[in-house]
Amino acid sequence: MTTKSHLLSLMSRRETVRLMQVQGALREARDRHAEAEAISERLSQMLESRRAAAQGPVAAADLFRAHRLTLQIAEQAERSAQRAAELSAALGVAQAEMARQDHRTRLLQESAATALAAETEERIARAEAARPALRRG
């Protein structure tokens, strides 16, 4: 016979596994977000250094290549910034899911502990009721 506390304990364990999966997804989202922000920052720094490194007279072809490269870096920096923003939103969703799953797991753990305590008290009460009364006299 499966008791309520046993069933709740099993459900709690299942939710704990789900919680670990959500934690893994959150960790992965954090890593991707941090990587995207780092790339975006490096590209922005590269772009700034190229803009600051404007030199004196340069051949038209060299100027055109430098301008084209600067535009490509700027486009890539913008794409990286957009990716970082998207991953930031995904990170928020993952954090909310983590909080929800953590709450659910805790509730089940508390319910299992409460049910076990109630079952233990009930078992003790039945054992005491089944014990014959002591005779005095």
Image (cartoon, rainbow, N blue to C red):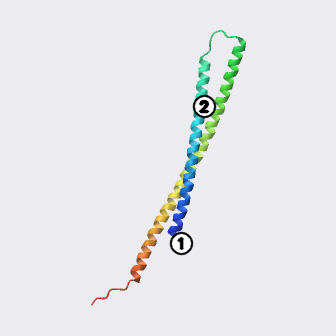
Label pair 1/2, CB-CB below 8 angstroms: no
| Residue that carries the numbered disc 2 in the rendered image | 40
The local secondary structure at tag 2 comes to helix
Above or below 16: residue 8: below
Q: Mark on residue 2?
A: 1
**Up-down relation of residue 28 to residue 131 (above or below):** above
Q: Amino acid at mark 2?
A: Ser
Separation (CA) of disc 1 from disc 2: 56 Å
Q: Nearer the viewer, residue 98 or 7?
A: 7
In the displayed structure, would residue 49 be above or below residue 4? Answer: above
Residue in the picture at 43% in, 79% down: 126
Q: Residues within 10 Å of mark 1 (few under 14, many from 20)?
A: few
Residue 9: x %, y % from top left: 51, 64
Quadrant (top left/top right/bottom left/bottom right) for the C terminus: bottom left
Residue 42, horizontal then vertical, whole percent? 58, 28
Look at discs 1 and 2 and give the one toward the viewer. Answer: 1
Q: Earlier in the sequence, mark 1 or mark 2?
A: 1
Question: Residue farthest to the left?
Answer: 137
- Label 2, residues with CA under 10 Å away: few <14, some 14-19, many ≥20: many
Image quarter in which the N terminus is found:
bottom right
Report x, y in % for residue 55.
62, 12
Q: Is residue 2 left or right of residue 135?
A: right
Q: Residue at x 66, y 22 (%)?
A: 70
SS class of the residue under badge 1? loop
Query: Which residue: 64% across, 36% down?
Result: 83
In the displayed structure, does residue 115 sit left or right of residue 68? left
The amino acid on which the numbered mark 1 sits, given as a three-letter code, is: Thr
Within the image, what quadrant is residue 84 found in? Answer: top right
Residue 31 occupies which quadrant of the picture?
top right
